[in-house]
Image (cartoon, rainbow, N blue to C red):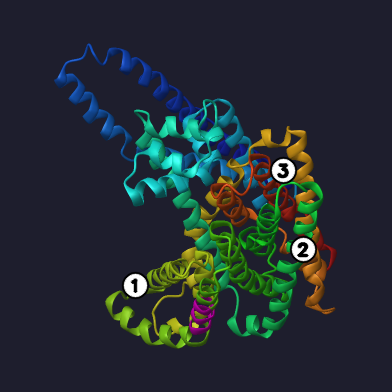
């Protein structure tokens, strides 16, 4: 039996590699071929006839409409499977394998100079640039001049490379592919937190509400103070605004990685998981308030009390109304939707609710995952007791989450630039920031009480993930954060993201 199992795993491995590796090489070959085709087409453009150019344009438009995105998704899902299998073979968390395989593939593509991988590596800069072009109607060059500094736009700068790619002949294709990858990843983390909410019970979450509030409060104050002290020590000439923005970046928490680890280990029903998830929601609200304060000071030199009050009130009203009245409203709506769609209402209605509340959270400037998590909390199988069918909501939604959630973690890994570790100054700052970020979140497990695994709660609050990258990107866009400090913050995000799956798994297995 063991021999058969071993043979099966070997066959599965060879199959995965056989599916994934050729896809990667096809993907890279397509990128390189595109680049050479651009050069040759520019050389031959003057020789071609108008009819020939029109034919080539129509053919190119047909080929690039969606096919590269399909190939992109196939490759990402394939390498996620490979990374997950390798991690589980080494008895590590699956999410760690997805992150690390993303780091490897992303950096190889970046070092080869492939345009898509360059855009993905600088996705935090691409999205603001795309938004500026879309909202104002400015050209890419004009929008870039508003967002980036002169050194970034100089020849060889990261922003200059992005502008050259986006304004090149294949710019629309690369923008579409990068945007699609980001969209798939956002969909993945929304589905992940929605399923986590489905597996949690709102009554049990409310029981640990006070503890979650204490954990979130300490988890914001402690890293903020440590970051402030670290900034004053290491960057004495940088100015108070830099120190404050640095401290604000250290406050952010990304719950996606922690939630995935708890779910993979079957620990979502533990008291520790409920405290962390509750604290993460509160942490998101507190982090948003801090960000509003810091951005206001950086932009106008003063604190906008009205804006802070608005954010606080909207957040409390949104979460309070959803958690208190959402279950009843859903109970009234489901019979009506069941009449419209008898066979698939148990799949379609929960998805529609998750996307609706994710949008609502985003509309009031909360993270969309907060709305998705709240949607999962207020739904239960009791709402569908009169609907035919034996399948549960979780079993119906799980396949979608299994496809798209790994895209989020692979994309996180693809944005890790290993060259950031080579600069001694950046590395020293990064180590100091990482120390402050880790210690600041570890102590937030103390208010959880002796009946809880305080060590695991502290470790679960460590990852900064995409939230930390957003904070750092905003600081860079405002001109508050310098290039070296930004790189150090990115390394801090990398460190906290990568150590959490390993350390949290170790901590959870410490206790039965």
- The reply to whether discs 3 and 2 touch (Cβ–Cβ < 8 Å) is no
The disc at residue 3 is 3
Q: Nearer the viewer, residue 182 or 131?
A: 131
Relative image position of residue 261 (x, y in whole percent): 68, 60
Whether pointer 2 and pointer 1 mark residues with C-beta atoms closer than 8 Å, the reply is no
Are there few (<14), some (14-19), or many (20+) residues within 10 Å of tag 2? Answer: some
Residue 225, numbered label: 2
Q: Identify the residue shown where x is 70% and y is 55%.
A: 240
For residue 108, side relative to residue 334 (left or right): right
Residue 380: x %, y % from top left: 51, 80
Q: How many labels does the image show?
A: 3
Left or right of 437? Residue 7 is: left
Q: Which residue is drawn at 43% across and 46% down?
A: 179
Which dot marks residue 463? none
Q: Can residue 4 be seen in this view?
A: no
Q: Is residue 285 left or right of residue 75?
A: right
Q: Quadrant of residue 355?
A: bottom left
Residue 181 location in percent, x, y? 46, 46
Calculate the distance from the C-alpha at mark 2 to the C-alpha at mark 1: 54 Å
> Distance from label 3 to label 2 (Cα)?
56 Å
Question: As rendered, which of 291 and 385 lies closer to the eye?
Answer: 291
Disc 2 element: helix
Q: What stretch is highlighted in magenta?
A: 313-321
Q: Is mark 3 on a helix, strand or loop?
A: helix
Magenta segment main secondary structure: helix
Quarter of the picture containing the C terminus is bottom right
Of the image marks 3 and 2, the number of the one nearer the N terminus? 3
Task: Please name which of the two marks, 2 or 1, marks the residue nearer to the observer.
Answer: 2
Residue 367 x, y percent position in the rendering = 52, 64
Q: Which residue position holds label 1? A: 343
């Amino acid at each position: 039996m063991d021999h058969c199992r071993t043979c099966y795993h070997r066959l599965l491995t060879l199959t995965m590699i056989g599916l994934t590796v050729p896809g990667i090489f096809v993907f890279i070959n397509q990128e390189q071929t595109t680049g050479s085709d651009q050069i040759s087409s520019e050389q031959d453009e003057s020789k071609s006839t108008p009819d020939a150019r029109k034919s080539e344009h129509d053919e190119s438009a047909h080929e690039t409409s969606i096919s590269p995105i399909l190939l992109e998704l196939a490759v990402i899902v394939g390498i996620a499977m490979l990374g997950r299998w390798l991690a589980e073979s080494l008895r590590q968390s699956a999410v760690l394998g997805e992150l690390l395989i993303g780091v490897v593939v992303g950096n190889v593509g970046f070092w080869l100079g492939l345009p898509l991988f360059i855009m993905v590596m600088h996705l935090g800069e691409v999205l603001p640039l795309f938004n500026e072009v879309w909202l104002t109607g400015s050209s890419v060059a004009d929008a870039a001049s508003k967002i980036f500094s002169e050194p970034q736009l100089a020849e060889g700068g990261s922003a200059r490379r992005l502008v050259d790619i986006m304004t090149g002949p294949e710019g629309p294709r690369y923008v579409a592919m990068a945007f699609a990858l980001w969209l798939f990843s956002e969909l993945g983390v929304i589905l992940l937190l929605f399923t986590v909410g489905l597996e949690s019970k709102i009554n049990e979450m409310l029981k640990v509400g006070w503890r979650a509030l204490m954990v979130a409060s300490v988890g914001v104050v402690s890293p903020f103070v440590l970051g402030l002290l670290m900034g004053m020590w290491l960057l004495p000439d940088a100015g108070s605004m830099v120190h404050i923005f640095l401290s604000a970046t250290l406050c952010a928490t990304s719950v996606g990685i922690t939630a995935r680890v708890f779910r993979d280990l079957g620990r979502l029903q533990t008291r520790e998981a409920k405290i962390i998830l509750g604290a993460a929601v509160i942490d998101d609200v507190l982090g948003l308030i801090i960000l509003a304060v810091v951005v206001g000071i950086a932009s106008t030199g003063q604190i906008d009390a009205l804006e802070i009050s608005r954010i606080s009130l909207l957040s409390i009203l949104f979460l309070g109304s959803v958690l208190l009245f959402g279950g009843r409203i859903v109970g009234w709506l489901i019979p009506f939707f069941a009449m419209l769609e008898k066979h698939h209402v148990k799949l379609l209605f929960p998805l529609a609710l998750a996307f609706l509340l994710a949008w609502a959270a985003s509309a009031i400037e909360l993270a969309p995952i907060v709305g998705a998590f709240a949607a999962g909390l207020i739904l239960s199988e009791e709402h569908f007791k009169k609907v035919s069918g034996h399948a549960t909501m979780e079993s119906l939604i799980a396949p979608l989450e299994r496809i798209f959630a790994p895209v989020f973690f692979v994309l996180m890994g693809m944005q890790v630039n290993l060259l950031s570790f080579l600069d001694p100054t950046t590395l020293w700052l990064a180590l100091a920031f990482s120390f402050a970020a880790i210690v600041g979140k570890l102590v937030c497990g103390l208010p959880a009480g002796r009946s809880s695994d305080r060590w695991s709660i502290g470790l679960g609050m460590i990852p900064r993930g995409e939230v930390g990258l957003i904070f750092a990107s905003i600081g860079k866009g405002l001109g508050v954060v310098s290039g070296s400090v930004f790189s150090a913050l990115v390394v801090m995000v990398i460190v906290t993201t990568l150590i959490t799956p390993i350390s949290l798994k170790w901590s959870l297995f410490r206790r039965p």
